[in-house]
Image (cartoon, grey):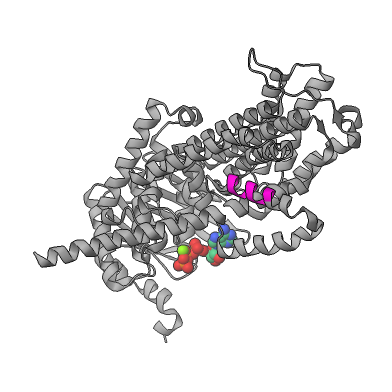
């Protein structure tokens, strides 16, 4: 099991680096960007569960992100609720709304599903933008509280918030890992490969698709709630379709339907955007070709590229061992 | 009666894909359905296995009317099928692709998945054992760890068989199981079907390869333009005027 072990070590190393970053760098701006990236990664994991593992590309994801953010914002600012109950309630509210939308949206398939959810996402955006009485409209919501201290654990400094988001992210990765590698996850993947075939081997496609959809909205809502509590100010733009497309790019570059893809893609693109900020909108001249070539040459993104290389190498090694054995057999 | 289609019809708009077909599948035998392209053979399978609701008529399985059940419920009853084309997970191993085949006999839910309960561990083990068992049965045990993307057409057909068998079926419906494979491989797949029957599984298949079907089948039904035009033993079908006409078109009478 050397591969499994080395995978484990790689994972531990990455987590260690993530833990050490705030101690090594005093650049608050960088920490801010990194914390924000972690929040996006959580949203991308939600999208990836549905689009990558179940085969249903939802374009309403930013809408659910917005619902999670506004749920937290409204509960605390207008409802006077304290942070923690609001923080747990926000993803639940998103999930409930997601359930009813999923019930209708999943009557469609493939591009019709994408178009339908695109419309749903836009409607959510419109509701947030136009329902001034509730959401404050374009003025947005200000004064959203950040996480309050849990007993002796203080959560108000930038470092503490970073660790808080990191903890949630690790929990999300763990959950996604467990789900994808379970019989439930196998059912999702079977649906992605061939829905008719999946149903013919006894998988309730309706139930499983709805479960995946609802889970994906849960992660979107969780990310939204984290975002609201981290930035402390939210406007309708966070549910805009642009955000959905950002998440989509993170997922595709990193690797759709892979476990590490959301982390790789999000960090890469966010860091790249930061480095290329001087180019302003001309950055797209770099992202455009990058995205296009990834889709053409490695449909499963950077993670997929690695996996393909890894399996090829493994197959080669195996073949090598077999021919070696054969020649040994020949000698004796 | 084991499995029976009663006066079964399916139309798509004005097109009568299956028209008032009566057919009973004989238990423990190899039943074949033949007919020209577009005769409605696949549609007949699709109606029986729940993919399409019949426009009229019934499907009876062991005394129960199953014509309104969805495909996953029908699979649960012990009716499995393969498709004319099978889309597998190319970037995963043969084994990984087949494990999910036994999912329908397990109960693990999201909670079990997240907390990795004892139940889910046992059930995963059960699914993996089943996958190995059926891969062994179809003669693919040696290829279990190979990527699906790198195996032959004939082996993919075997995976499709394995998936169907992993559901613990009493009857399997195979839609053109030997399409696109060479004669030697066809012979081997035919033997595999006989092996299924020996194991107590009833086989019902659609086939275009006449020679093979005449040797293999115990009972044959011929469809043409959605209608049953003949039914019987291979010998009876071979000598049936209408069948010859349907297959050779006008040239038979000319
Ligand atoms: N979902 C559908 N919607 C509309 N028409 C359909 C549908 N499925 C099949 N048909 C039509 O029904 C007729 C019977 O098709 P079917 O696929 O059952 O034929 P088949 O006997 O399996 O042919 P083949 O040997 O080519 O596989 C064809 O005319 C086909 O175009
Ligand atoms: Mg057909």
User: Where residue A179 sits in the image (x, y, percent)?
Assistant: 50, 36
Res. B101 image quadrant: top left
In the foreground, A174 or B193: A174
Query: In the picture provided, is B51 more to the left or to the right than A310?
Result: right
SS majority, magenta: helix
The answer to whether any part of residue A1 appears in the image is: yes
Q: Is residue B30 magenta?
A: no
Q: Which residues are magenta?
A: A262-271
Is residue B123 positioned above or below B8 on the image? above
Give the percent coordinates (x, y) of residue A144.
Answer: 80, 25
- Asked if residue B176 shows in the view, the reply is no
The x and y percentages for residue A14 are: 52, 40
User: Can you give x and y, in whole percent of width and height, for residue B99 in the image?
Assistant: 38, 45
Residue ID at (57%, 33%): A19
Q: Quadrant of the N terminus of chain A?
A: top left
Is B117 situated left or right of A171 in this image? Answer: left
Q: Which residue corresponds to the image point at 57% horizontal and 34% vertical from the top-left?
A: A20
Residue A238 higher or lower than B45, as above or below: above
Magenta region includes residue A266: yes
């Amino acid at each position: 099991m050397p591969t499994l072990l080395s995978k484990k070590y790689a994972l531990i190393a990455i987590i260690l680096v993530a833990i050490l970053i705030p101690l090594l760098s005093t650049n608050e701006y960088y920490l801010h960007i990194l914390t924000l990236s972690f929040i996006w990664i959580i949203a991308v994991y939600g999208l990836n569960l549905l689009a990558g593992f179940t085969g249903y590309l939802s374009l309403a994801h930013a809408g659910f992100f917005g619902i999670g953010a506004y749920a937290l914002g409204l509960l605390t600012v207008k409802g006077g609720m304290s942070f923690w109950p609001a923080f747990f309630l926000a993803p639940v509210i998103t999930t409930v709304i997601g359930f009813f939308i999923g019930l209708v949206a999943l009557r469609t398939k493939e591009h019709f599903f994408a178009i339908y959810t695109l419309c749903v996402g836009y409607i959510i955006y419109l509701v947030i933008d136009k329902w001034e009485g509730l959401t404050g409209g374009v003025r947005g919501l200000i004064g959203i509280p950040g996480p309050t201290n849990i007993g002796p654990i203080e959560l108000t400094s930038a470092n503490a918030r970073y660790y808080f988001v990191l903890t949630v992210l690790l929990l999300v990765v763990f959950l996604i890992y467990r789900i994808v590698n379970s019989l439930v996850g196998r059912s999702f993947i079977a649906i992605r490969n061939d829905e008719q075939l999946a149903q013919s081997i006894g998988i309730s496609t309706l139930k499983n698709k709805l479960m995946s959809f609802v889970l994906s909205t849960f992660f979107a809502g969780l990310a939204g709630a984290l975002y609201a509590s981290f930035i402390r100010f939210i406007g309708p733009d966070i549910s805009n379709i642009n955000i959905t497309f950002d998440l989509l790019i993170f997922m595709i570059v990193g690797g759709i339907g892979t476990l590490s893809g959301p982390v790789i893609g999000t960090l890469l693109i966010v860091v790249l955007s930061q480095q290329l900020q001087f180019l302003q909108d001309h950055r797209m001249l770099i992202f455009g070709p990058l995205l296009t070539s990834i889709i053409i040459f490695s449909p499963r993104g950077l993670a997929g590229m690695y996996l393909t290389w890894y399996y090829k190498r493994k197959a080669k090694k195996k073949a090598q061992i077999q021919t070696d054995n054969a020649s040994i057999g020949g000698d004796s | 009666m084991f499995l029976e289609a009663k006066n079964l019809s399916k139309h798509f708009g004005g097109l009568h894909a299956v028209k008032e077909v009566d057919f009973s599948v004989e238990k423990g035998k190899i039943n074949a359905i033949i007919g020209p392209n577009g005769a409605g053979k696949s549609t007949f399978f699709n109606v029986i296995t729940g993919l399409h609701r019949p426009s009229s008529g019934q499907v009876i399985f062991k005394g129960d009317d199953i014509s309104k059940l969805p495909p996953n419920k029908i699979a649960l009853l012990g009716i499995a099928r393969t498709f004319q084309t099978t889309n597998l997970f190319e970037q995963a191993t043969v084994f990984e692709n087949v494990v999910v085949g036994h999912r329908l006999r397990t109960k693990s839910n999201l909670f079990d998945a997240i907390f990795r309960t004892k139940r889910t561990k046992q059930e995963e083990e059960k699914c993996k054992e089943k996958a190995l068992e059926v891969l062994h049965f179809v003669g693919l045990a040696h290829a279990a760890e190979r990527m699906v993307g790198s195996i032959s057409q004939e082996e993919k057909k075997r995976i499709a068989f394995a998936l169907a068998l992993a559901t613990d079926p009493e009857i399997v419906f195979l839609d053109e199981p030997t399409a696109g494979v060479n004669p030697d491989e066809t012979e081997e797949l035919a033997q595999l079907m006989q092996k299924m029957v020996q194991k107590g599984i009833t086989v019902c298949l659609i086939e275009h390869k006449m020679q093979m079907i005449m040797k293999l089948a115990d009972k044959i039904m011929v469809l043409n333009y959605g209608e049953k035009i003949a039914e019987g033993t291979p010998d009876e079908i071979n000598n049936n005027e209408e069948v010859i006409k349907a297959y050779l078109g006008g040239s038979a009478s000319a």
